[in-house]
Image (cartoon, helix red, strand yellow):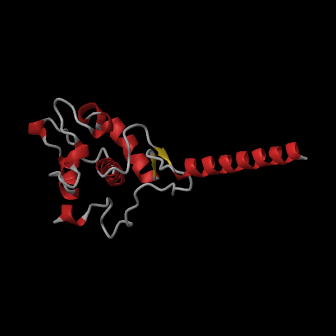
């Protein structure tokens, strides 16, 4: 009887430990889990921006660290980002991406950079979190003669 009680106690402690460990593991923040918008932005950044601005947007010897440029202390706001990506800065070696990138792709890249700069996304390859929307950045439908969404600040 005594051995049976000890065995039941050991079993109960083991089950409590397993439950605690499982809860602790799920409580750990997934530092690479992102929404689809941020993931799509990462993919576009990898294709178009990494060769100059470096992996994880940390910069290179000839292009700035966008992780810092678009951050709270950086000099690039949303408007400057959009205009720079669209028109480039040929004098500084930044190509003109113009209409090669859709407005949604530009916005997805912006969202990726904001996630990196504000500490919501660790360096490395992100993945879409379970249950995240499968949509990328969605703009309102075109109005009248507009065939391409352009933010109001670009039109003015």
Name, please, the residue furthest toward the top.
61
Q: Do we see residue 97 in this rendering?
A: no
Residue 118 at what x, y percent from top left? 30, 52
Question: Could you say which is closer to the camera, residue 5 or residue 62?
Answer: 5
Q: Where is residue 45 drawn, in percent x and y?
A: 33, 41
141 or 69, nearer to the observer: 69
Residue 125, x across and y down, in percent:
43, 38
Residue shown at the point (41%, 60%) measured from the top left: 138
- Check the picture and name the quadrant holding the C terminus: bottom left
Q: Would residue 81 appear left or right of 16 to someone viewing this image?
A: left
What residue appears at the point 23 percent right and 36 percent down from the top-left corner? 59
Give the quarter of the image for residue 139: bottom left
Q: Residue at x 82, y 48 (%)?
A: 8
Q: Is any atom of residue 127 visible in this view?
A: yes
- Camera-side residue: 106 or 14? 14
Q: Residue furthest front?
A: 2
Q: Position of residue 31 (x, y in %)?
A: 43, 46
Which residue is rendered at x = 44% and y = 44% of the image? Answer: 32
């Amino acid at each position: 009887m005594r051995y049976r009680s000890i065995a039941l106690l050991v079993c109960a402690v083991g089950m409590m430990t397993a439950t605690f460990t499982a809860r602790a593991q799920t409580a750990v923040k997934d530092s690479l889990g992102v929404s689809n918008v941020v993931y799509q932005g990462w993919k576009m950044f990898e294709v178009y921006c990494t060769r100059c601005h470096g992996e994880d947007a940390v910069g290179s010897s000839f292009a700035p660290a966008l992780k810092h440029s678009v951050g709270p202390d950086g000099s690039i706001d949303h408007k400057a980002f959009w205009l720079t990506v669209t028109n480039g800065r040929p004098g500084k070696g930044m190509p003109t991406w113009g209409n090669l990138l859709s407005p949604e792709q530009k916005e997805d890249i912006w969202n990726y950079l904001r996630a990196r700069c504000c500490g919501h996304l660790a360096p490395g390859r992100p993945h879409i979190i379970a249950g995240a929307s499968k949509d990328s950045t969605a703009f309102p439908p075109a109005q009248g003669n507009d065939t391409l969404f352009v933010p109001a600040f670009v039109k003015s």
